[in-house]
Image (cartoon, rainbow, N blue to C red):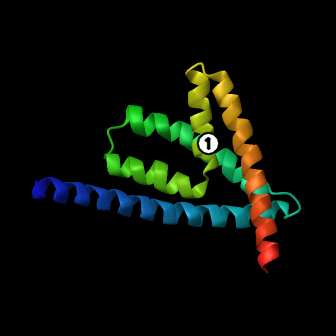
Amino acid sequence: MLEFWEAKLSQSLSQIVVIMFGGAFGALARYMLTLKVAEKFGTNYPYGTLSINIIGSFAMGLLAILLVERFALDPLLKLGILVGFLGAFTTFSSFSIETLSLFEQGQQLKALGYILSSVIFSVFAVWMGVLLGKALS
């Protein structure tokens, strides 16, 4: 029984480590790309975030197919890239692939509900956070 738990803990630690490293590189890539886009196009519109969300969504779609279905990569490497790197680069990529999955499953109403609720509740939540932050400061 102890061997089972040691193996599980070792597996979990490995997953945590690859997600952390992937996340660190994803966050750095996001920051660097945001700076480059702002340098080129200015900061009067969120071009950086828009670019990151589009690039990250494209990468998630492409790599979800290539890494999961086509190439026999180590599952930890897939986890580090898809969850760690792309998760830190943009969570919009996760939102996008989950929405597409709902549409592909024929669950159009759920997909539309997910889109609307994600946008509306997220904007509302950030507004509430700003209001609370202002009230506390």
Q: Residue furthest bottom?
A: 137
Please name the residue shown 33% across and 46% down the image. Answer: 75
In this view, the residue in front, 39 or 108, is 108
Quadrant where the C terminus is found in the figure? bottom right
Residue 40 coordinates in the image, percent (x, y): 80, 62
Q: How many marks?
A: 1
Task: Identify the element where label 1 is drawn.
Answer: helix
Q: Is residue 71 left or right of residue 94?
A: left
Give the residue at mark 1: 95
Q: Is residue 15 left or right of residue 63?
A: left
- Three-letter code, disc 1: Phe
Please name the residue shown 62% across and 24% down the image. Answer: 103
State which quadrant residue 66 falls in: top left
Residue 117 coordinates in the image, percent (x, y): 71, 40
Please name the residue shown 77% across and 45% down the image. Answer: 120
Q: Is residue 100 left or right of residue 128?
A: left
Q: Is residue 15 left or right of residue 44?
A: left
